[in-house]
Amino acid sequence: MVRRILSIIITLAVVIGTLPVNTNAAETGQEMTPTRTETLELSISQGEENQEEGWKWTADNNGGTLELENCYIKTDEVKALRFVFPDNNNSKTINIILKGNNIIETTSTDYKAMIGSTDKAGSSITYNTLGDYVIKGEGSLDIRTSEPITKPESPYAFGGKSIRIESGNIKSNIGFCFVRKEVNIQGGSMYIDIPSGIGALDGVYGEPINISGGDIYINAPQCAIRSDDGDINITGGNVECGSKESTSGIFSSCNINITGNGETIPNVKVSNKPGTAFSALHSNNISVSGSAVIADSIRNFDSIEEIIEKGIVFNGSDGKVYGETELTSCITLPVGSTLSVPEDSVLHIKNGGGSLIIPDGALLVNNGIPVSAGNGEEICITGGYIKKEGVFCTNHNKKYSIVTIKDGDNETPNYYSEGSIILLEPG
């Protein structure tokens, strides 16, 4: 009996020791081991599956669905993942469902798409009009070139017709997409940081680009977000992007529209290198409404400001609250900046969904009264509103202002003399 039990234990030990390495690494957070070292080429006419490599392809006449679960493809060729469409006149929808942690990597530095669609097996493409990609799921996808990146150009992740991101966590050290039609980001998270010196790369390129949700961080040598022949529309989400070298954080030859939809307020922070010929937010036509925009510079801001009905907008270090604005997300004032709340403006901070953080070195000027953190701390105002309720005179003819800070159901009106510093308790 003892020998039988010992035999079972040894057998279990052998089985556990032969489990796929990448599954264990995904669970422990350790570096994964490649599960495939050659191009994965899939046809819309045939389904395939390889559980050891971590992928399953279900084909249909309209395209197909690729499920990735702890899959790590690492190739020497730039073409790491290819979808073959025999009929190159009609684009197909490719659903990519993310489960666990997934990596697609190339050691190549060719300026071509790592993930793309083609009309014949074995071909390599720069970009074309095939492939409508939809990314979703609760997992992650890291698309990258092996570092260090030494050439002036580099691969980019997706080439095709359009791409839509519904959910999932995406990371990349190269340009994410160069598509000929729409980029649509609805949710999930995106972290793209492209090294300097890769001069040909933008972070996200499409015609047009629509962002309605998600947490997005893009830092690129050229434009973080760019559309030459389409509008850029941001109606939701948290977007932080910048240009490291010589162009704009957000650039469109057409229109840039940053407008809240009434329920959520887009939170947009955009920067670029000082002294360049482009503004950080650059377009011939820019409109902002019901949004929080913090930009190093905004092209033609004087004409834009005249038509802003509500929102929070920074053009450089000076910011202003316009109209009656409700803050539904967390905003931290840039150090060295000043946010002003004029007499005809009200800043609502949605309870449970919004907060305004004033770090030491930033200033909120509420109708002429500065609100400062000081002492190396920061103020966090949550769940209330900031507005001026009136001005009155004392017997000594000295002017005071009534400033109301509301926290939940508690309102605290205080009288402050003009020019005084209001020190609030750190949040």
Image: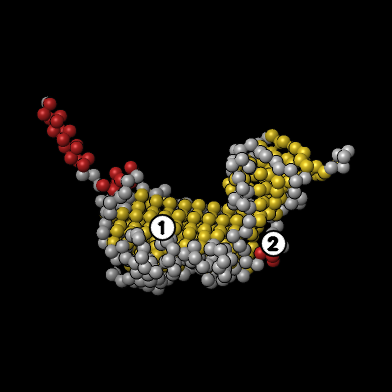
Quadrant position of the N terminus in the picture:
top left
Q: How many marks?
A: 2
Classify residue 297 by image quadrant: bottom right
The amino acid on which the numbered mark 1 sits, given as a three-letter code, is Ser
Write the residue at 62% across / 59% down: 316
Write the residue at 50% across / 52% down: 215
Using the image as rendered, state which of residue 159 and residue 313 is in the foreground. 313
Write the residue at 52% across / 67% down: 247
In the image, residue 104 lies at what x, y percent? 34, 58
The amino acid on which the numbered mark 2 sits, given as a three-letter code, is Glu
Asked if labels 1 and 2 touch by Cβ distance under 8 angstroms, the answer is: no
Using the image as rendered, state which of residue 376 and residue 258 is in the foreground. 376
Query: Would you say residue 259 is visible in this rendering?
Result: no
Q: Which residue is mark 1?
A: 172
Horizontally, residue 406 falls left or right of residue 59, namely: right
Q: Which residue is mark 2?
A: 305
In the image, residue 160 lies at what x, y percent? 41, 67
- Vertical arrangement, residue 30 with respect to residue 181, above or below: above
Query: Would you say residue 421 is visible in this rendering?
Result: yes
SS state under label 2: helix
- Seen as rendered, the residue at the extreme right is 395
In the image, residue 310 lies at what x, y percent? 69, 55
SS state under label 1: strand
